[in-house]
């Protein structure tokens, strides 16, 4: 199933998701919940890398990796489209291999119910 990733845009959406459920591991913290006025057939995901992690090049690299992992996860597993996701990267994501991050993140996405 091919679904387009749409980023969250409004400040209210971010605030509402931060109050919802979360799953955390050593690479990222994933906030997820049901938002009003959301399209059912689209995947709402926003990726956040804080300034503490590094300069703009490093932060963009992290966000590209996470987006790529989510695109791959959509093909591999059944991601719940009813939820909106907010993925916040942690500083040690830069020091680890892409394959390890991918396996850990896909395992966490399988646990979301």
Image: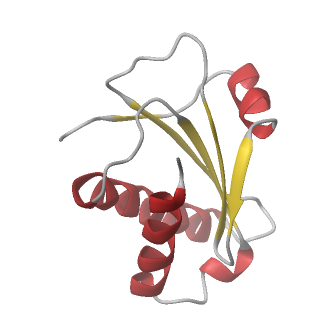
Residue at image x 47%, y 89%?
A: 97
Q: Quadrant of residue 5?
A: top left
Is 14 located above or below residue 1 in the figure? Answer: above
Q: Residue furthest left?
A: 1
Q: Residue furthest top?
A: 37
Q: Residue furthest front?
A: 113
Residue at image x 61%, y 89%?
A: 95
Residue 12: x %, y % from top left: 75, 20
Residue 14: x %, y % from top left: 72, 32
Is 112 located above or below residue 12 in the figure? Answer: below
Is 62 located above or below residue 13 in the figure? Answer: below
Please state, as top left, top right, bottom left or bottom right, where the N terminus lies in the image. top left
Q: How is the image coloured?
A: secondary structure
Residue at image x 42%, y 78%?
A: 103
Is 62 located above or below residue 9 in the figure? Answer: below
Most foreground residue, 62 or 100: 100
Residue 71: x %, y % from top left: 31, 54
Say how many tags the image has: 0
Residue at image x 74%, y 24%?
A: 11
Residue 10: x %, y % from top left: 66, 21
Horizontal relation, residue 107 to residue 25: left or right:
left
Most foreground residue, 31 or 62: 31
């Amino acid at each position: 199933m091919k679904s387009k990733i749409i980023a969250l845009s409004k400040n209210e959406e971010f605030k509402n998701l931060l109050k919802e459920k979360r799953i955390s591991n050593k690479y990222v913290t994933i906030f997820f919940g049901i938002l009003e006025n959301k399209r059912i057939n689209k995947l709402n995901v926003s990726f956040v890398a804080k300034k503490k992690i590094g300069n703009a090049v490093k932060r963009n690299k992290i966000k590209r990796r996470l987006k790529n992992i989510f695109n791959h996860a959509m093909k591999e597993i059944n991601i719940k489209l009813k939820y909106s996701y907010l993925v916040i990267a942690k500083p040690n994501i830069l020091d680890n291999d892409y394959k390890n991050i991918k396996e850990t993140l896909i395992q966490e996405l399988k646990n979301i119910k």
